[in-house]
Image (spheres, rainbow, N blue to C red):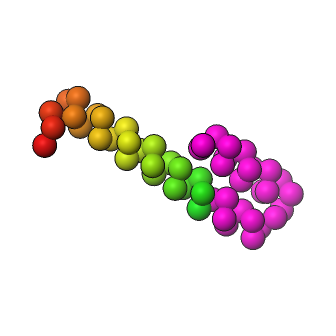
């Protein structure tokens, strides 16, 4: 979940766990991308019909 990934990333930043932040950022980025792709498909189908 995106919010869980962001919270983990934030906590690692506050603790200055730089190496762990890299992994957490990748997880966060993948979570954002998955949500965006899912939403984009519904958006296109709704406004432009299925292609």
| Residue at the limit of the structure toward the right, as seen here | 15
- In the picture, the quarter occupied by the N terminus is top right
In the visual, does 40 lie left or right of 36?
Answer: left
Q: Is residue 35 above or below residue 28?
A: above
- In the picture, the quarter occupied by the C terminus is top left
The front one of 22 and 49 is 49
Q: Which residues are magenta?
A: 1-25
Q: Is residue 6 magenta?
A: yes
**x 59%, y 62%: residue:** 26
Q: Is residue 33 above or below residue 38?
A: below
User: Percent position (x, y) of residue 48?
Assistant: 16, 34
User: Percent position (x, y) of residue 22?
Assistant: 67, 66
The kind of secondary structure the magenta stretch mainly shows is helix
User: Percent position (x, y) of residue 30?
Assistant: 52, 56
User: Percent position (x, y) of residue 17?
Assistant: 81, 64
Where, by quadrant of the figure, is residue 12 drawn?
Answer: bottom right
């Amino acid at each position: 979940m995106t919010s869980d990934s962001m919270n983990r990333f934030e906590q690692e930043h506050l603790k200055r766990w730089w190496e762990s932040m890299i992994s957490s950022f990748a997880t966060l980025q993948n979570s954002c991308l998955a949500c965006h792709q899912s939403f984009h498909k519904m958006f296109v189908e709704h406004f432009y019909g299925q292609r």
